[in-house]
Image: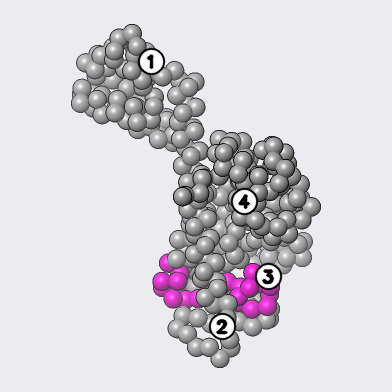
Amino acid sequence: MLSALGLDATAEAVYRAMLADPGGGVAALAARVGTTEQQVRDGLDALSELALVRPSAETGGLRAVSPDLGMEVLMARQQAEIAAQQQRLEASRAVAAQLIAEYADLRPATVSPGVEQLIGLDQIRDRLTRLTREVRHEVMTFAPGGPQTEGNIAASRPLDAELLGRGVRTRVVYLDSVRHHRPTVEYARWTASLGGQVRTVASLPTRLIIVDRSTAVIPVSSEDSAGGAVVLTGQGTLTALCALYESVWAVAQPLGEAPVRDGHGLSAQEATVISLLSEGHTDETIAKRLGVSTRTARRIANDLMERLGARSRFEAGVRAVQHGWLPAQPG
């Protein structure tokens, strides 16, 4: 039952036995659990690593930590792992940004294996239409930019219905900001009713479409996704982009679930704002990353500064590190 919190079946059984019989030794625990003494010792080692058992001041042996404290310890550990995964996600964003920069200077005359350049919205739409007809198994999409327009939603419905009707697996990651936009939420629920999967994250590295894990389309410029794009088919590039997608998907929250807050009570969106503030980004840049208005980005930033008791953004970054909201910088 506690495997989701990092506790295996044997360790959990030993923990429950210790709660039921606080004074029992290894032999008694083995008899109660129905296992060997060595397995009990292994379980005690695992419990010790998770801080679920402590030395007893009275008996000199080990005693089980009460469940209310123990579950809090396990959940804090899981939250720390989620935070670490978020940091790995940020590192993946840097890799993606480097990849985009590598192709940002492509020109029509450029010839490179595994790279096809598309100029203008018409070429992009025509190429996406062909890819949609050819897809057989899966479409993976990053959709930054905030809530979708009703026109885009109306245009996408027939295409989504056709793909899902053919049994194509579709996964889309939106920004958390779409959770407050009713047309986008209704569209996502409609997609889910047909078998599509929709999740959200606080920010996304770029707009991205991956078809059958063999072809990817990304914009040349994140500032003007309609101006031009590149179609990538190189095996190494696709492997990296698929890994990036899976790392984002793993930490994204299903749209139907309430957003998760970390051990400091921060939503993923707030944690992203704190990180961007510490890096010196403006309200306008933060707003673009979150897919919200500049006014909303400024409000979130001001609320966080007030919670930190900071009078400047530099001070907010310092206090965020002191409060454990951000990792301390080395050296």
> What residue is disc 3 on?
223
Farthest-out residue, right: 295
The disc, 4 or 2, on the residue closer to the chain's N-terminal end is: 2
Distance of label 2 from label 3 (alpha carbons):
16 Å
Cβ–Cβ under 8 Å for marks 1 and 4: no
Report the magenta residues as a range.
Answer: 216-239
Magenta residue check for 217: yes
Residue 262, compared with residue 87, is above or below; it is above
Distance of label 4 from label 2 (alpha carbons):
33 Å
The disc, 4 or 3, on the residue closer to the chain's N-terminal end is: 3
Is disc 1 placed on a helix, strand or loop? helix
Farthest-out residue, bottom: 109
Magenta residue check for 99: no
Residue in view at x 45 percent, y 69 percent: 238
Mark 1: give few (<14), some (14-19) or many (20+) Cα within 10 Å: some
Instruction: Point out which mark residue 106 bears.
Output: 2
> What residue is disc 4 on?
278
Q: Nearer the viewer, residue 45 or 16?
A: 45
> Disc count in the image?
4
The disc, 1 or 3, on the residue closer to the chain's N-terminal end is: 1
Amino acid type, label 1: Leu
Residue in view at x 66 percent, y 72 percent: 225
Can residue 278 be seen in this snapshot? yes
Instruction: Point out which mark residue 19 bears.
Output: 1
User: x, y (%) of residue 164?
Assistant: 58, 61
Q: Nearer the viewer, mark 1 or mark 2?
A: 2
Residue in view at x 63 percent, y 61 percent: 143
User: x, y (%) of residue 88?
Assistant: 47, 53
